[in-house]
Image (tube, rainbow, N blue to C red):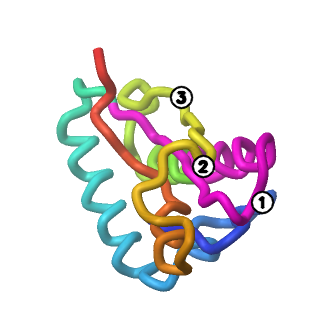
Amino acid sequence: MEFKEGLPKANENLESVLGDSKEFFLGALKRNAHTMKKYSHVRFEVLGFTDDKECTDIQCRELAARRAKLVYDWLISNGVPASSLTPPAEHGNSMPVDDNKTVAGRARNRRVELNIAPD
């Protein structure tokens, strides 16, 4: 799921901070939550990321942490057991999935990923 640049700030809801494909991302998150509830014996991780232009150093880590926490809280408020989730984690801008030199690439790098947690 992709986030608007520099968001979230304090006390913002998930819908207000998602990128242009908000409906797509919310639909995917709802399907993921359904799967997580169905397989509650599996642990999942919630990882936050940023691009390398919207922030620097510690600000990137803090922003990525806010993104991960917002999704983590959304999942729990939508019935995913906390025991199925690892604590939200941040990776700042350290693991880009696209080129930070383009607007589209930076948008893809401002994200939260849900993964099966390693044992």
Q: Which residue is mark 3?
A: 87
- Label 2, on which residue? 93
In this view, the residue in front, 49 or 44, is 49
Q: Is residue 60 magenta?
A: yes
Residue nearest the observer in this picture, 79 or 84: 84
1 vs 2, front mark: 2
As drawn, 107 above or below 96 = below
The quadrant in which residue 52 appears is bottom right
**Residue, far top:** 119
SS category of the residue bearing label 1: loop
As drawn, the label of residue 11 is 1
Graded by Cα atoms within 10 Å as few (under 14), some (14 to 19) or many (20 or more), the crowding at tag 1 reads few
Q: Earlier in the sequence, mark 3 or mark 1?
A: 1
The residue sitting at 36% across, 29% down in the picture is 84
Q: Position of residue 79 (x, y in %)?
A: 39, 46
Residue 5 lies, in percent from the top left, at 67, 72
Residues rendered magenta in the picture: 44-69
